[in-house]
Amino acid sequence: MMAVPLDHYVALAAVMFFIGVIGVIVRRNPLVMLMSIELMFNAANLLFIAFARAWVQNSGQIFAFLVITVAAAEAAIGLAIIVTTFRPQKYVDVDDVRTLHG
Amino acid sequence: MIQFWILAVILIASAVWTISASKPVYSVVALLLNFAALAVLYLTLSAEFLAVIQIIVYSGAILVLFVFVIALLSSGVAPFAMGPNRLPRIWLPGATFVLAALGFLVYAVSKAVPVLTRPAGPVGTANVFGSVGDFGTALFTVQLLPFEVTALILMVAVIGVITLGGEQMRDPGARRHERTVEREIREAILREGEG
């Protein structure tokens, strides 16, 4: 059953991670950018779990658990920042945020 | 093997859909599909507990949070538009860079990595690799520090969100002003209805 080579998982995680990178670079909607970051977190998680399975060590699963927690915290704080930043604005677009330009 | 390819196709297709959807709600739906497929993939990798956590935390909590924020931000008159399309300026160099990096990474890892052939034990019994019992035993004994760090991270998230969300509540004068404006608007609407 487990005849899938490990590099297949690594390649799949790499593809997912870079789709997330493209999403962060290209999209101007902060919500979609945050979702792309979630995609990247999940690619890292997939690697942790695939390697944990390859060496039959559950430390990788524990760390995937930690990454899920970090992702949840990041989503909560990121969405709070988005709400406080974009609530008064008409359009949700990161290019409209110029407060830090000085 | 066949499960892996099916899931890989679903994962990549839903990831592409996530970043290319025209509306954020569609992105959330695509991301939901992605997370569900990933949970199934975790099951094939004998990570039972994490598959359940993936569904509960990601699909259940994080995506619902996203949906709430989308509803909150787009509930007014403002459309959820992208505005003028500014993609072409950065699309080409960005995509080139990303594809080059991806190609390099895939090439680099395609060299001599082990095959997943070691048995993990029968599924569904306690204390074999990846079962909930095995995971919990490791989490509360050997790997106690990451578990405690988890508590710290969640605490930081709670404090951060309260700090950010409490900004508006801290100024009672502003809130009173807001309420006055709201009442005026409501009265104006009522007057409109009468007249």
Image (tube, rainbow, N blue to C red):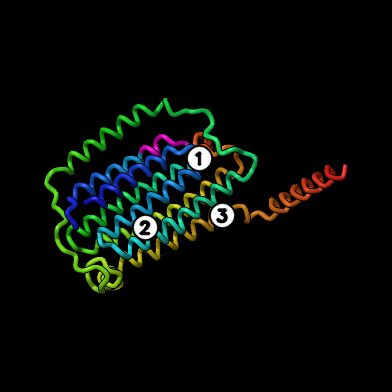
Q: Which percent across, then down, holds residue B168?
A: 62, 52
Q: Depth check: B188 or B54 in front?
A: B54
Examine the rendered structure and indicate whether residue A100 appears above or below residue B173: above
What amino acid type should be assigned to the residue bearing mark 2? Ile
Q: Depth check: A8 or A38 in front?
A: A8
Examine the rendered structure and indicate whether residue B130 appears above or below residue A9: below
Left or right position of B22 against B95:
right
What amino acid type should be assigned to the residue bearing mark 3? Gly
Q: Depth check: A23 or B161 in front?
A: A23
- Chain of the residue on which disc 1 is drawn: B
Secondary structure, mark 2, is helix
What amino acid type should be assigned to the residue bearing mark 1? Lys
Left or right position of B152 against A3:
right
Q: Which percent across, then down, holds residue A23?
A: 39, 39
Q: Is A26 included in the stretch rendered in magenta?
A: yes
Instruction: Quickly name the residue at label 1.
Output: B23
Check residue A68 in the rendering and tell me which mark sits there, or answer none.
2
What distance separates the C-alpha of mark 2 from that of mark 3? 23 Å
Magenta residue span: A22-28
Secondary structure, mark 3, is helix
Closer to the camera: disc 1 or disc 2? 1
What distance separates the C-alpha of mark 3 from that of mark 1? 25 Å
Q: Main secondary structure of the magenta part?
A: helix
Examine the rendered structure and indicate whether residue A31 appears above or below residue B150: above
Would you identify the image quadrant in which residue B189 lies?
Answer: top right
Would you identify the image quadrant in which residue B53 lies?
Answer: bottom left
Instruction: Quickly name the residue at label 3.
Output: B165
